[in-house]
Image: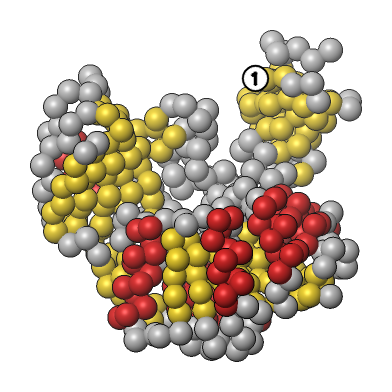
Amino acid sequence: MIDLQKTYRGTVQKLVFQGKGLVRLDNFVIFVPDVLPGEEIEFHLIEKKKSYGIGVVDQIVTAHPLRRKPVCPYFGRCGGCALQHAPYSEQLKFKTEWVEDALTHSLKDTLELKVAGADQEWSYRQRIVLHFEKDENLKIGYIARDNTTLLDITECPIFSEKPIPLFADLKNYLSQCEGRVSGSATVVKAENKYLLHIFFNEGKAAIPQLFDSWLGVTVKERGSIKEAGEQFYCTDYMGLKTKISASVFLQNYPEMASKLYRDVIGALDDKPTLDLYCGTGVLSLLVAKKAARVVGIEVSENSVRLAQENKRANGIENCDFFAGFVEEKLAKIQEKEGAKNWIINPPRQGLSQKVRELILSFLPEKIIYISCMPQTLGRDLVELQKKYKVVGSNMYDMFPQTTHVETMITLHRR
């Protein structure tokens, strides 16, 4: 009988996806965070389910020989990083195992997974989303591991190893708002300055102002938008003139994204291509330099507007973008375009049943499936392999210190 009041001792057998250590008490599985394989630990349970339990470490009895001290003072409380206590080489091994495990259970054929590790493990993030709330006290930070508490922070080493005025400046601005406020602030690096998009869930926003480190800020509350400074930052990315904004989704690690994009381009030929869930269209526009024609579909209208601007800025004429749900737009667009190649980059939940049915109905010659969630990728591949053969698998670590990982699968029609 498992007792929530009792302290147990056990050995960590391995790390599973999400970075938790697997420990067995007889035949009962317990998941414990902040441990490493082979470590002997003392722990207690905080939650017991029918088939597994959740534990918390009380003491590391025998530590992994490569265990290191986490850099971030919030590690263990923040809901973001889960692997800072492991050297980066070990982190890469864990992620490789997780992706290989997901693919092993779904692929009909055995393939070598090509792994691209990160060039830097700190200060790599281009974009973060901070949450804030102010009543009697003002807090700015990330959601804690309990998925409820707001953790007040003053630094984030995966965004910047050096102290930056961002957090203090944001608190300064929010302190000028009257009464209770809550919301989120998306922050994007623009060289030595920042673009901010501040969204208020409740409360009244103060008039935005520019601090020395802010290139531009947009403040959005119900019924109004207030702006100060520049709202876009222009940069050259892989030879492409691109505008970036804090109001739309961006790849968090541009250098690693470029490795992925080069592999995507290399896996495609010059035939017409669809780019599903295309975001701001950066990959679409890069592929358009090789393909006869590219059409992107994206649900975010703001992202599509930015994609159209980037298209015009680069003088690319063989690429178009459409705003809407893939489920609603795909059939009509494909019937017109007859694209032979499809790039698919869905959110974490993977492909809906409707999209999987459309793929197996239209049967494009090649599919490049880009995934940030190995489990849903594996689920989708089981169905796609009815008509497709997987000919390539690549992994890219765009998220050091976290358990997230990006995977690219190349499929050819059978």
What residue type is disc 1 on?
Ile
Q: Give the answer, above or below, for where 409 lies relative to 196.
A: below
Q: Nearer the viewer, residue 57 or 136?
A: 136
Q: Nearer the viewer, residue 267 or 65?
A: 267
Q: Nearer the viewer, residue 296 or 258?
A: 296
Q: Would you say 11 lies left or right of 124 here? A: right
Q: Would you say 141 lies left or right of 318 here? A: left
Q: Would you say 367 lies left or right of 243 here? A: right
Instruction: Tell me if I can see residue 219 in this picture.
Output: yes
Q: Position of residue 410 (x, y in %)?
A: 71, 72
Local SS, label 1: strand
- Name the quadrant of the C terminus: bottom right
The residue positioned 17% from the left and 62% from the top of the image is 230
The residue positioned 13% from the left and 37% from the top of the image is 206
Q: Position of residue 249 (x, y in %)?
A: 41, 57
Give the labeled residue for mark 1.
46
Instruction: Tell me if I can see residue 255 in this picture.
Output: no
Q: Residues within 10 Å of mark 1 (few under 14, many from 20)?
A: few
Res. 222 image quadrant: top left
The residue positioned 52% from the left and 83% from the top of the image is 293
